[in-house]
Each structure stands twice: as structure tokens, then as C-alpha cells.
Amino acid sequence: MGNYQVRFRGRGTAGPSWIGWPLPDWREQHAGRTVWVVRKGATPAFPGQQSFVGGSMGDDAVILEGVAGAEAEAALHSTVHGAGRVCSRREARRRFTRAEMEAWLRDCHVLLAGGDLDESPMAYRRLPDVLAHHAGSVRVLHRLRPFAVAMAGPGEFDPFKD
């Protein structure tokens, strides 16, 4: 952890107060220079470092590790944290049907409890295709095949959806 802190000013019953916590030190060495790297939507993948990357509810997830090489250095030893969407949540709800999503998952032998069209596997890129573009910076160690997915259903409040 670094020496940096984020402070939020709030009002409690006793008046203004400050809370804070130390932030991680995002300084790294790359190409002989000290730089700050903030990986929003990315996962660190230094040589030998293992990471988990999830697929959609119909795709395998993987455990991978970073490898040394020019491509890895150019990416600041970062890789994807998922396959990425091909359409927005709103567009997925408009474009796909529940029957299409259930057929897709049935073909993949995946059981679904809950879930809604905004998380439909058709709304995401295929993880194997995405990882193929990163072959010079990561190596897949294990594939994890889903057999069941449990999510908040279409009528349920999910505070973690963006």
C-alpha cells in the first residue's frame, strides 16, 4: 500500500467528519521508467502472475498467466478482465428474446436461475476470440466450463448492476 489517501467529507450527527484509507501504490517500472498504471477494465499480467478472466454465462472462464515478451511490455503487462460487450444492456434487452437466451444456454449445457436479457451471452464477445488476440502476452493455464449460473432475475433489484 502507498502513502496516498482518499478522503471523503461527510456529515454525521456530530457534524462534518473525514474518513480515509490508503490506496494501492500504482507506480510500476516499465521500459526503465517509473510510471503510474491504473487498470480500469484490465487485469495485471506480469510474467508468471496468474489471473482469473470470466466469460459470459455461456463461455468458459480461464485462469491464465502473463508471459514475457514485447507484446506484454507494450501492454504494460495488462490483459482483459472479460470478453467485453458487443451491445449495451438496453440494446441487449431490445435485441434478444428470453427464448433465444435459454436456447443458447441449453446448447452450452448451462442451467440458469434468474438472469435477464442484459446479461445474455449473445451480448458479449466470445472469450476464446478475445484471448487469441492476446496470445503474445498471456498463456491460458486452465479452462473452467460453467454448468450453472445464478443471478438476480428480471424483476429483482440488483445493486451491483452498472
Image (cartoon, helix red, strand yellow):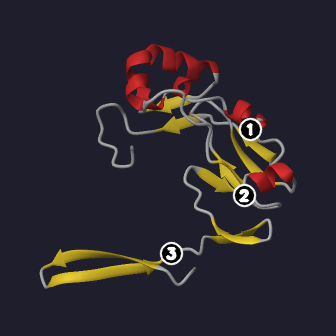
Residue 69 is left or right of residue 60, and the answer is: right
Q: Identify residue for label 3.
A: 23
**For this rendering, which residue is in front, 153 or 21?**
21
Q: Is residue 124 above or below residue 162?
A: above
**For this rendering, which residue is in front, 24 or 139?**
24
Tell me which amino acid carries mark 3: Leu
Quadrant in which the C terminus appears: top left
Q: Is residue 85 above or below residue 26?
A: above
Say which residue appears at 58% left-offset and 61% top-offset: 38
Mark 2 lies on a secondary structure that is loop
Q: Are marks 1 and 3 in contact (CB under 8 Å)?
A: no
Q: Identify residue for label 2.
A: 76
Residue 29 placement: quadrant: bottom right
Q: Identify residue for label 1.
A: 131
Q: Is residue 13 visible?
A: yes
Q: Is residue 114 above or below residue 10?
A: above
Query: Real-space Cα distance between discs 2 and 3?
Result: 20 Å
Mark 1 lies on a secondary structure that is helix
Residue 104 is left or right of residue 133, and the answer is: left
Q: Earlier in the sequence, mark 1 or mark 2?
A: 2
Mark 3 lies on a secondary structure that is loop
